[in-house]
Amino acid sequence: MSAADEITFKKELVAAIPHLRAFARSLCNDPTQADDLAQEAMAKAWKARDSFEPGTSIKAWTFMILRNQFYSEKRRSWRTAPLDMEMAENTLLANDNPTVPMELLELRSALAKLPDDQREALILVGAGGMAYEEAAQVCQCAVGTIKSRVSRARRALETLLAEAGSRQSNDHDIRADEAFNDILQQAQALAAGGVRSKGE
Amino acid sequence: MGKDHSGGDSGEGRKDRAGEDAGAKPVDARVARRRQDPIGRRLRQMYDDVVSEDVPDDFMSFLEQADERKSDSQTEAPQKRALKAES
């Protein structure tokens, strides 16, 4: 790679960082873990810069690196522990911050219930605004596969959110609702006990 | 038409997206459809909230260090030793 190419590459990489962070956050949920993942992906991309084809989408290329890393390191906090303390902490952080509305928490918990492949397709296309072709490149699958994953994910999400919405308006004792309240209570307990002392 | 993301259009990292949207007709149609879709709005908000955050310093300092390593090949890279193998 020539010096000029390298400067261009670096500029594009820098511009991609906010997107890498957003994609990582959607995969990890935990902000610290997500930033670690994004940073590692950036370092990997930089190291592998000679294999980047100038003129192609650096966003898709770096996302692919990040995604491969995520799955190879089995950082599956979404699947392994959606209702654990980490989630409670996120809830707490979100509640501390009045700009994060309840509906975003609802969205996150609904996303957590989707299969990995559907969730990531929906995040790339529906949240990140990627073209299907780019998303297919990131996930290393056919464009048609991405399309069907996105539409299945959307339908599932609509159902989940509609359920969450009716639960809220009815205010009935429904199991999932209890689970959610439980998280809130955990979060409040953490707040009372000082969450920052959790050894991190 | 990158207007659906108008919240932070002045920010960095938007160029690529704006280019994408302006490029192909099918994407335009999709964007138009998504605009009136509450779930899509929430999804984008979740993503864009992170995009619009300030990038933590360590990201940039890593790349600055990468420069230093190049100009002075023996400069220590305390953060990412894995990269020592490069060159």
Image (cartoon, coloured by chain):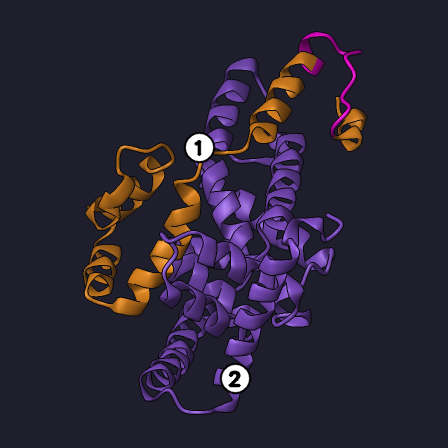
Chain colours: A purple, B orange
**Res A131 visible:** no
Q: Residue at 47% x, 57% y: name it.
A: A94
Q: Does the magenta stretch include residue B76?
A: yes
Query: What percent of the width, then of the height, locates residue A86?
Result: 64, 61
Q: Which of A175 and B48 is in front in this view?
A: A175
Residue holding disc 1: A15
At label 1, the amino acid type is Ala
The subunit carrying tag 2 is A
The residue located at (33%, 62%) in the rendering is B42
Q: Specify the label residue A191 is tagged with.
A: none
Q: Kindly report the secondary structure that dominates the magenta region of the rendered protein.
A: loop
Kindly report which numbered mark, 1 or 2, lies closer to the viewer in this rendering. 2
Q: Mark 1 lies on which chain?
A: A
Which residue is rendered at x = 44% and y = 46% of the image? B50
Say above or below: A24 vs A136: above
Query: Can residue A77 be found in the magenta stretch?
Result: no
- For the residue carrying disc 2, how many other residues have a C-alpha within 10 Å: few (<14), some (14-19), or many (20+)? few
Q: Alpha-carbon neighbours of circle 1 within 10 Å: few (<14), some, or many (≥20)?
A: some
Say if A171 sits above or below A65 in the image. below
Left or right of A95? Residue A35 is: right
Above or below for A56 versus A119: above
Residue drawn at x 24%, y 58% as measured from the top left? B31
The residue tagged 2 is A178
Residue stretch in magenta: B69-79
> Residue B15 in the image: x percent, y percent?
32, 35
